[in-house]
Image (tube, rainbow, N blue to C red):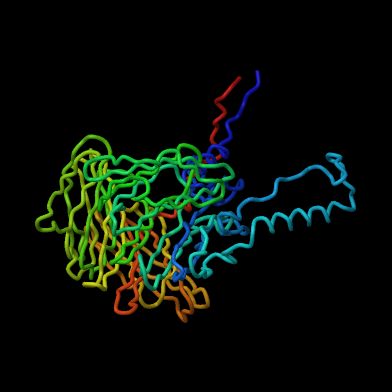
């Protein structure tokens, strides 16, 4: 009878691969990370990111940024490359020699044949749009107009743990004018987007990006104020291999509704997804996916000078729920007058105007269902400015920063880092990286009191040239939520964009490889 040993390393790698497009290897025997009888926390060794097509405007000016923090215990080699989505395919390996005899090669021609294959692969894959040279230093690339591509990329080795990418686009005029920013994300199979619209004043696209060599099949469901909207072509949408597909939401249904929840379900394969919400009068921005449906949600970093805040929420299923609404302010949790509870009907999108909720102070929304029993997704649309000089941005319910998160494309002026500790005191460390064109990293530690939101004075690299990355690490307490706002003023209009900071999932716990898991026999 033969004994088959279950490979712990393979099991851990498979687990990581299905939770964030990442892989991890067990440490070398005798390494410091390996602990007998306990799990070791190790850097992931491979990960991937997808960036949607930035804009359809000829006036768009886009900056792509890529960064990986320095991670203790990471490999000393590796790459991090972002390429245009359509340039991802590589030629198939051909084991036959030129004379048609499989497997037969002249020894003197081996090197030349290998060089030719490498050159062909590089040519077909296309030149990288962004490629990191070293951890701890961000790199940028620029693209103008409507031709800026969607990007697909992978990082391995020393760049994989905490790899982050962002695209920031400025549109000077027209529908969606303003500052639009979105963090590139991993592929997945399900997404929720409360806060989209099919109204005539909005032009909202759901961008689907497929990183793989096979087609993905996607269903798009829309939910309005009275329940699910009838769609004509929302089922079985095919996203070709290594390509990006923008779908205009108003073409999926004849119903025009101001507030819609979009549910993306991938039948086959996986995709990256984000909604680009563009308004004729109030500019536009990206709407990232909400955190998974939950009975407790945090929407961090509403700008203190917001002139209007509109909350859009949705609960899947048939159960109604009364949400308790609180604002985490600099002094603690506050119940907004007139909006103590909000009623949601099961399967129907609800919207609530909260006005100038923050009243000149930093703030984050904390939504709670009774006993956390009914799951909810939510996002807010935020306006800054007055009259015809308003700009809009979106903040979805966010995931906590469990260990570390990074925001890119920061500048010495116009960057606000907002941190929320809804349930307990928190200590965080914030590191400003070197600049893209020069500068020395700086680090500060902050304490955030329970129930509060603080707009902290984040560090700036000494001698900064270019833009830089801000990395937030949880040192004690929690949970902690964070977001970053970029702002500028153009023609009297307050351009801005807000990105929540989800955990980068750059570390994973791997059980001790010395455990005996030889339990399978045959």
| Nearer to the camera, 445 or 263 | 263
**Residue at point 28%, 62% (across, down):** 301
Q: Is residue 387 depicted above or below 299 in this figure?
A: below
Residue pushed farthest bottom? 463
Pinpoint residue 396: horizontal percent, then vertical percent.
Answer: 31, 54
**Residue at point 53%, 77% (across, down):** 437
- Quick check: 160 left or right of 251? right
- Residue 475 shows in the view: no
Q: Is residue 201 depicted above or below 192 in this figure?
A: below
- Quick check: 415 left or right of 241? left
Residue pushed farthest left? 338
- Quick check: 14 left or right of 194? right
Residue pushed farthest front? 254
Q: Is residue 481 depicted above or below 434 in this figure?
A: above
Q: Is residue 136 depicted above or below 192 in this figure?
A: below
Pinpoint residue 376: horizontal percent, then vertical percent.
Answer: 26, 44
Residue pushed farthest top? 1
| Nearer to the camera, 275 or 467 | 275
- Name the image quarter holding the N terminus: top right
- Name the image quarter holding the C terminus: top right
- Residue 522 shows in the view: yes
- Quick check: 140 left or right of 288? right
Pinpoint residue 244: horizontal percent, then vertical percent.
Answer: 50, 52
Total numbered badges shown on the rendered structure = 0
| Nearer to the camera, 453 or 496 | 496
Pinpoint residue 466: horizontal percent, then vertical percent.
Answer: 48, 77
**Residue at point 76%, 44% (across, down):** 94
């Amino acid at each position: 009878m033969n004994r088959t040993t279950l490979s712990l390393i393979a099991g851990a790698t498979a687990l990581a691969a299905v939770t964030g497009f990442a892989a991890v290897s067990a440490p070398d025997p005798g390494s410091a990370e390996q602990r007998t009888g306990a799990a070791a926390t190790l850097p992931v060794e491979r990960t991937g990111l997808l960036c949607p097509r930035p804009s359809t405007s000829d006036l768009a000016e886009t900056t792509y940024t890529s960064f990986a923090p320095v991670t203790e215990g990471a490999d000393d080699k590796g790459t991090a490359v972002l390429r245009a989505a359509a340039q991802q395919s590589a030629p198939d390996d051909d084991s036959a020699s030129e004379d048609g005899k499989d497997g037969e090669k002249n020894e003197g021609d081996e090197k030349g044949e290998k060089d030719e294959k490498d050159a062909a692969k590089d040519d077909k894959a296309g030149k990288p749009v962004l490629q990191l040279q070293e951890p701890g230093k961000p790199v940028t690339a620029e693209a103008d107009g409507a031709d800026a591509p969607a990007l697909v990329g992978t990082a391995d080795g020393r760049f994989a743990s905490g790899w982050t990418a962002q695209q920031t686009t400025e549109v000077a005029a027209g529908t969606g004018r303003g500052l639009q920013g979105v963090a590139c994300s991993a592929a997945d199979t399900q997404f929720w987007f409360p806060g989209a619209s099919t109204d005539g004043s909005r032009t909202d696209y759901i961008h689907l990006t497929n990183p793989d060599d096979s087609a993905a099949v996607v269903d798009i469901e829309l939910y309005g104020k009275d329940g699910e909207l009838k769609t004509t072509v929302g089922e079985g949408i095919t996203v070709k291999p290594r390509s990006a597909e923008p779908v205009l939401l108003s073409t999926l249904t004849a119903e025009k509704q101001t507030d819609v929840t979009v549910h993306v379900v991938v039948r086959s394969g996986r995709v990256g997804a984000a909604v680009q919400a563009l308004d004729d009068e109030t500019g536009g921005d990206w709407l990232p996916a909400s955190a998974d449906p939950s009975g407790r949600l945090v929407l961090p970093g509403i700008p203190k000078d917001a002139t209007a805040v509109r909350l859009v929420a949705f609960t899947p299923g048939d159960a109604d729920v009364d949400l308790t609404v609180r604002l985490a302010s600099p002094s603690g949790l506050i119940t907004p007058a007139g909006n103590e509870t909000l009623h949601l009907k099961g399967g129907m999108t609800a919207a609530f105007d909260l006005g100038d909720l923050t009243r000149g102070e930093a703030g984050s929304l904390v939504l709670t269902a009774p006993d956390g029993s009914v799951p909810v997704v939510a996002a807010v649309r935020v306006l800054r400015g007055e009259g015809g000089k308003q700009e809009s941005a979106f903040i979805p319910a966010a995931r906590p920063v469990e260990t570390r998160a990074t925001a890119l494309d920061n500048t010495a002026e116009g960057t606000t880092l907002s941190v929320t500790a809804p349930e307990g005191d928190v200590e965080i460390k914030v590191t400003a990286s070197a600049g893209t064109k020069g500068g020395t990293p700086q680090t500060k530690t902050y304490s955030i009191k329970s129930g509060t939101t603080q707009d902290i004075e984040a560090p700036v690299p000494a001698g900064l040239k270019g833009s830089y990355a801000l990395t937030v690490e949880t040192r004690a307490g929690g949970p902690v939520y964070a977001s970053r706002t970029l702002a500028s003023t153009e023609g009297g209009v307050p351009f801005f964009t807000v990105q929540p900071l989800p955990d980068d999932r750059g570390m994973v716990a791997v059980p001790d490889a010395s455990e005996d898991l030889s339990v399978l026999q045959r």
